[in-house]
Image (spheres, rainbow, N blue to C red):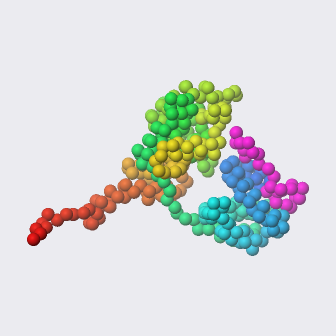
């Protein structure tokens, strides 16, 4: 479902006049997800991935879900594997898996509600996921360099600094940042409530005194000049008085990372990875990091134990017998 500030409304995926066609059944599928309280992000993503598949089917004369067989889906899976983007790169196995997962959910819904005779996607095997480490993680000094890039002599610089401080401090996702309200900040307790984060779950996380100071400065000096009536309480506002869209947040943070010239790329997740890694290196328990980041599974958080090389190196230096170069003090004098 579109969020405030989104300019594009979800359009039907084809001709709705055919009750057995893709468009009509897709609308029933999306309505069911809304009724069962799926997140707007999940609905939007499944809409996009289903649109790709329907366009692929249309090119091959397939106009109804009932015409899709397991062989058709296997052919589509091979198409995804061989597909190349404009820059020549293939789709990652994660991207392939997301597209196929959306199809599995769609056809499962149709079969469950007897809209098709059987589920052709029931035995489609998803690509095995790669366990990749974050591409870049900043050092503490690099993170401070990016934060200091914001021109806090300007109102929007104060806003941007407050946003980045909050991401760095809490590791929250850009979606969670965009949805924050004024009443979610509890300065007295030093906490922030993240409502309906990933998985439609609320969580309360601590926020640092420094981040709070920048938020208070922004709220007192900058936000009153940005807000327009009616004020819905959204914490961070654009220059037009609107809530930030996800793409705009990404571009804002990325621009500061580029301007800092630290030799690393990234945006909001760069700060998220950095926060988790630095806290682990400073002795935080991985389960604490899991709670802060809002991970449903501990194994998702444990990837940061592989990134925090500083801690691993300390143990290696302390315990490996050949970790240090030992110079002999008993060298024979050269003739």
| Magenta segment boundaries in residue numbering | 1-26
Image x and y of residue 176, in percent: 59, 43
Taking the image as shown, residue 84 lies to the left or right of residue 145, namely right
Image x and y of residue 105, in percent: 71, 61
Report if residue 135 lies within the magenta region. no
Report if residue 4 lies within the magenta region. yes
Which residue is at a point 63% across and 32% down the rendered structure image?
239
Vertical position of residue 113 compared to residue 164: above or below: below
Residue 125 visible to an observer of this rendering: yes
Counting every numbered tag in the picture gives 0
Q: Furthest-front residue in view? A: 335
Q: Nearest the camera: 208 or 159?
A: 159
Q: Nearest the camera: 94 or 240?
A: 240
Taking the image as shown, residue 206 lies to the left or right of residue 47, namely left
Q: Nearest the camera: 260 or 38?
A: 260
- Classified by dominant secondary structure, the portion drawn in magenta counts as loop
Q: Furthest-right residue in view? A: 17
Which residue is at a point 72% across and 44% down the rendered structure image?
2
Image x and y of residue 322, in percent: 27, 66
Image x and y of residue 98, in percent: 65, 60
Quadrant for residue 60, please give it.
bottom right
Taking the image as shown, residue 178 lies to the left or right of residue 151, namely right
Taking the image as shown, residue 335 lies to the left or right of residue 282, namely left
Which residue is at a point 44% across and 41% down the rendered structure image?
144
Q: Can you say which quadrant of the picture contains the C terminus?
A: bottom left
Residue 332 visible to an observer of this rendering: no
Vertical position of residue 260 compared to residue 73: above or below: above
Q: Nearest the camera: 330 or 233?
A: 330
Which residue is at a point 48% across and 43% down the rendered structure image?
260
């Amino acid at each position: 479902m579109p969020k405030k500030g989104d300019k594009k409304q979800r359009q039907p995926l084809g001709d709705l006049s055919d009750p057995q066609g893709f468009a009509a059944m897709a609308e029933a599928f999306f309505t069911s997800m809304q009724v069962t309280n799926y997140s707007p992000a999940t609905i939007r993503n499944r809409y996009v991935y289903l649109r790709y598949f329907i366009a692929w089917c249309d090119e091959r004369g397939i106009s109804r879900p009932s015409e899709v067989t397991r062989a058709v889906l296997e052919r589509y899976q091979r198409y995804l594997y061989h597909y190349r983007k404009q820059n020549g790169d293939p789709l990652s196995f994660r991207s392939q898996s997301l597209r196929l997962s959306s199809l599995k959910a769609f056809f499962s819904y149709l079969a469950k509600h007897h809209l098709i005779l059987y589920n052709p996607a029931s035995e489609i095997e998803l690509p095995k996921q790669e366990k990749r480490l974050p591409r870049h993680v900043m050092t503490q000094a690099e993170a401070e360099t990016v934060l200091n890039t914001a021109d806090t002599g300007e109102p929007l610089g104060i806003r941007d600094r407050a946003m980045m401080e909050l991401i760095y401090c809490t590791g929250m996702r850009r979606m969670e940042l965009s949805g924050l309200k004024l009443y979610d900040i509890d300065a007295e307790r030093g906490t922030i409530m993240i409502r309906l984060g990933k998985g439609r779950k609320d969580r309360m996380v601590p926020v640092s005194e420094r981040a709070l100071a920048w938020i208070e400065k922004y709220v007192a000096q900058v936000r009153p000049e940005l807000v327009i009536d009616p004020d819905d309480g959204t914490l961070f506002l654009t220059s037009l008085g609107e809530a930030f869209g996800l793409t705009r947040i990404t571009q804002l943070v990325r621009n500061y990372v580029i301007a800092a010239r630290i030799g690393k790329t990234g945006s909001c997740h760069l700060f998220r990875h950095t926060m988790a890694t630095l806290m682990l290196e400073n002795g935080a328990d991985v389960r604490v990091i899991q709670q802060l980041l809002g991970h449903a599974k501990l194994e998702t958080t444990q990837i940061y134990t592989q990134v925090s090389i500083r801690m691993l190196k300390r143990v290696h230096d302390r315990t490996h017998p050949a970790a240090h170069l030992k110079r002999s003090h008993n060298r024979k004098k050269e003739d």
